[in-house]
Image (cartoon, rainbow, N blue to C red):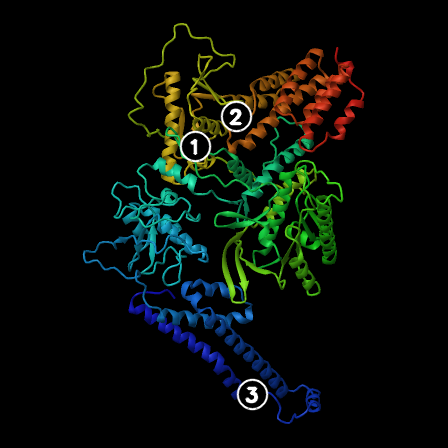
Amino acid sequence: MAYRSSPQARLEALLTAAATGTITLALLVGMPYVLWRATGVPWPDRIGSWRGLGEWLEQPVTDPLMVDLLAMVGWVCWAAFAWSLLTEAAWYALHLPHLLRDRTAHRTHLETLPVQRALAALCIGTLALAVISLWRPPAANAHQHTPADGARTHITVPAPAHAGPTKDEPNPTRAARSTQARGVEYTVAQGDTLWDIAETHLDDPLKWPRIYALNKNRIQADGQRLTDPDHLTPGWQLTIPATSSPNPPQPTPHPAPTKPSAPPTPTAPPLADPAPGHRAEHDTTSRATRDHTTSHTRPGPAAISVGTASMIGITTAAGLLAALRFFRFYQNRSRRPSLDAQPPPLSPVIENAVAAAREAALPRPTTADPDRLITRRTPPQPPQPAATVTIGTANASEISLDALAGGCSWTGPGAEAAARALLIGILTAAERLRPQTPRVRGLLAHDLRDLLLPGLPPDFSALTSAEDLNDAIRHAEEHLLAHARHHQDTQEAAHGTLPATTNSPGEPTGPGTLVLLTEPNTAQSSYLTALASRAPHGALIVLALGDLPGTAAWRIASDGTVHQQTDEGNRASTLQLFHLTSQAGQDVLDMLLTAHDERPRTRKVPGARAAAAPPQHPAEDTDRDPEDDPLPAPPQHANPVKARETNQNKPVRLNVLGPVTLYAHGNTEPVGLGLRGEVREFLALLAAHPAGLIADDIARHLRLSEDPDQSAKELKNLRRAVRRALRSATGYSKAEFIQLHGELHKLHAGLIETDLAAFTEALHHAAAAPDGSARLTALHHAVDLYHGPFAHGGDYPWCDSIRESLANKAVDVVAHIAHHAEHTGTRQDADAALDRLEKAIGLNPTHELLYQHAIRLHQAAGRHDTARHTLDLLARNLKEFGLKPDPATRALLTARPRSAHLG
């Protein structure tokens, strides 16, 4: 039960202790008394030897005999229960100091016990907690305020007891203490609710989830935690986030943390002059300066959430990004050109991982920009070096595979998910080194392979499967022998006995590291332990899914949290392992198989969420300021300027196929050249989603501040910048170029046209053309509209899939034009198609389909040397990725040309 400062709480604790003690005593003493009174001692008095016991067992089964047998079973069960009670009593007595600090240790201990001991642990543990609640003295800051005037309880800001968390302090305590340094402390009074506290101190009761999120992991003075937002215990200390109101409560609160889970830099007491390394955590008068400063002092996340119950590291995400180029190459090689078919979308797991990796690779500003319109959220941390495999995070940093040196055994509900993430980490590390040799390899038995990654080939990339555990041990021994030979050769080369071997740049200088993942058995446990302990550093790591004596024992929760099992019991650790569900692991494996030209099983990938339908009457944009004064009416040109060749019909044309540029009607020169990069990205995002995007999706794509109020202001700044620039360029002083339908943002279809919409419309016309001539005209029009990759030159992590999809559509259009020239066209059509192919190859230098059409056209025209040079160009471009042209492409040089069609 929860600790309270009132006599009623102590009475409840007393009643709980009495009830639990009575139940335990009844089970311990009452059960043998009932058995003795009902059946007596089940052992027959006349049996005095083993022979007598045998004769008694040979008697016919009678009712008295059955009663004696049942009584004996009852006595055995009671003895087992009594032994469990004694064992649990000893455990709770040994861990009493830990229970005083953290009451959740009781629940954690119950989760680790088998069913036969859970009842005994529940009785002893409940009794121990009740006694602790009676014995524990009231905490100094856990008093109940009773103001005479009926006002709310005052807020106090206690100074930290020390500058920062200790080394062995649990992670939740560190998180709570770090939030105290940047918030204000509130002592819960009788009858308080989160709704009332938010209404009083944040001026908005709907902000109560902020208080809950900031305090849910904090251990209170009574050892409990805030797990239910509807239950508050008087005396608890809550951290209230800072308020932006003009009259904040005294003393001045510190700024609210944007990510409570990330451990900030420790701070000094508020009255002390902060040290230079700690100044970023203190209040500043400028929000922009504070946001910029903290973005440099607070590290970004190292773990990436990729779906429900799945988390990987930024290093693994970087490996998936490296594999994506091979995935798309082989996907394009096997894809047939189509004008209306949409390519299958990437799995959400891959999308999230790739987006995080691209965001981590963006250049980081070194100086503050006083004119910026938005504040980007803190990007993820840079990934570890290419050959590194990471297993989890601790203190907001990735932990490498070296943490498992000397052997380790994983148990618990999260062991399989963590092992699956480790295998994916080994595979993605190999992708970052490709086409070089992987430096970390994995070895596991085929039954364990089928359990963790079903569908994985026996030997794929950096993973090798063995027939059984004995075969895996043999492979591990061979690997250790190879390490020993390499070490000996290195020593002899250093002394001049052998000539030194030269490795190509980037190639490993030895056999690398082997990770042996296994399920140990009794017969091989000692041998596995010896392998783990005697293997040289960096040569072999033995990881057991199960108990392996002599190695570090980790119990892994379903969320990846690690508890190190020692002789004194489970000890909480700050390490959280990466973990993947079976479905998430299958999504990643399918992508990696395609990246190696393997064919994964066919699955239907869920599509993207459909956009909400806009209301009938758009709302007025009310975010105006005095600077948005009406401009002069649009000028009436007596002699209108000749329109551009793109046949612009609306006041503004937005081009996103190529660099993002704006044109005003009647002006051949681009406008808005002074627009900032974030404004151009905002326009490109809306152009890519003509049906509109809600504010939350825009903030996510543009990586805006995680504070909803701040991101709303920044969206307003972006709309205002677009409005000013386009009103000035067009003369439309009242126009709203970005429509708002509640939270839905979209380009005004009556004022802005885009080349992307025209390109899409041309594709529709080509697909629905009634004859070949109309189809060819629409295809050429679509190619003329495609001036380059989507938003070319912009480092926008959100546009990668859009850019690839549009590039594939442009390639399909050129392929259809070339196909027409090959079969039914004239020499003029062939030359025009070759011109289109040359430009498309310049934009897509590894797209093999374009080269195939070019080779066939050159062959048909009798230019065999040019056809061979085209194949050589493809080979050179693919060699950079360690790839080779498809045999079907090479066979085109020996195929019979179709020169009869070109005349």
* Mark 2 Cα-neighbour bin, 10 Å: few <14, some 14–19, many ≥20: few
Q: Mark 3 belongs to which amino acid?
A: Thr
Could you say which is closer to the camera, residue 181 or residue 781?
181
Disc 2 marks a residue whose amino acid type is: Gly
Instruction: Residue 606: name its quadrant.
Output: top right
Is residue 749 in view? yes
Residue 416 place in picture, x, y as percent: 60, 54
Sequence order check, earlier mark of 2 and 3: 3
The secondary structure type at the circle numbered 1 is: loop
Q: How many marks?
A: 3
**Disc 2 target residue:** 793
Give SS at disc 2.
loop
Q: Position of residue 88 (x, y in %)?
A: 50, 72
Is 727 placed left or right of 417 in the picture?
left
Question: Quarter of the image holding residue 638?
Answer: top left
Q: CA distance from mark 2 to mark 3?
A: 89 Å
| Percent of width and height locating residue 179 | 37, 50
Kindly report the distance in space between the C-alpha atoms of the residues bearing marks 1 and 2. 32 Å
400 to the left or right of 631 = right
- Label 3: which residue? 39
Query: Is the residue 866 above or below the residue 266 in the image?
Result: above
Outermost residue toward the top in this view: 639
